[in-house]
Amino acid sequence: MCGFAGFSAVVPLYALRLGLAGSDYVFLTYASLILTVRLFGARLPDRLGPERTAASFLAVSTLGLLVLAAWRSVPGLFAGEAVFDRTGPCLPGAHDHRRA
């Protein structure tokens, strides 16, 4: 969640710095991808198990933030956001319900 908090705090300023009029299209893309991942990846945590799901989400989230940091352009912003979007916020049921 810290990655998303940083992402949502920095993206509006970063989009302005890159020359965009605002970050509205970035967050629109983010929301659209979240809905898509939730629809098509809802059973992924059940198949992978909680440990593998958490590890893969952490790796993909880190990769997305690295793309944002390394590719400093508008396409890099959208590419990093698209990779980052494939992680934990997309699948809230990715924890093990059996260990209550």
Image: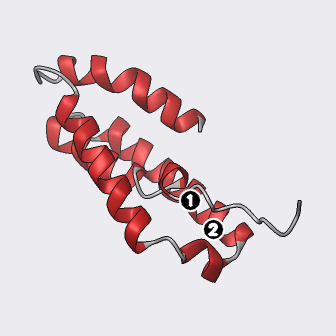
Render colour scheme = secondary structure
Residue 98 coordinates in the image, percent (x, y): 84, 69
Q: Residue at x 49, y 27 (%)?
A: 6
Vertical order, 43 against 15 (above or below): below
Q: Residue at x 61, y 82 (%)?
A: 47
Label 1 Cα crowd, 10 Å radius (few <14 / some 14-19 / many 20+)? many
Label 2 Cα crowd, 10 Å radius (few <14 / some 14-19 / many 20+)? some
Give the image quarter of residue 83.
bottom left
**Residue named by callout 1:** 57
Residue 50 coordinates in the image, percent (x, y): 72, 68
Q: Residue at x 23, y 37 (%)?
A: 26
Vertical order, 65 against 96 (above or below): above
Which quadrant does the C terminus fall into? bottom right
Vertical order, 99 against 88 (above or below): below
Would you say the residues marked 1 and 2 are in contact, meaning their CB atoms lie under 8 Å apart?
yes
Residue 56 coordinates in the image, percent (x, y): 58, 65
Q: Residue at x 49, y 58 (%)?
A: 60
With 30 as the anchor, is 52 left or right in this view?
Answer: right
**Amino acid identity at mark 1:** Phe
Depth order, front residue of 19/26: 26
Q: Tell me the element at label 1.
A: helix
Give the image quarter of residue 52.
bottom right
Q: Tell me the element at label 2.
A: helix
Residue occupying the far bottom of the picture: 47
**Residue named by callout 2:** 53
Which quadrant does the N terminus fall into? top right
With 19 as the anchor, is 43 left or right in this view?
Answer: right
Depth order, front residue of 17/91: 91
**Amino acid identity at mark 2:** Thr
Depth order, front residue of 75/72: 75
Residue occupying the far right of the picture: 100
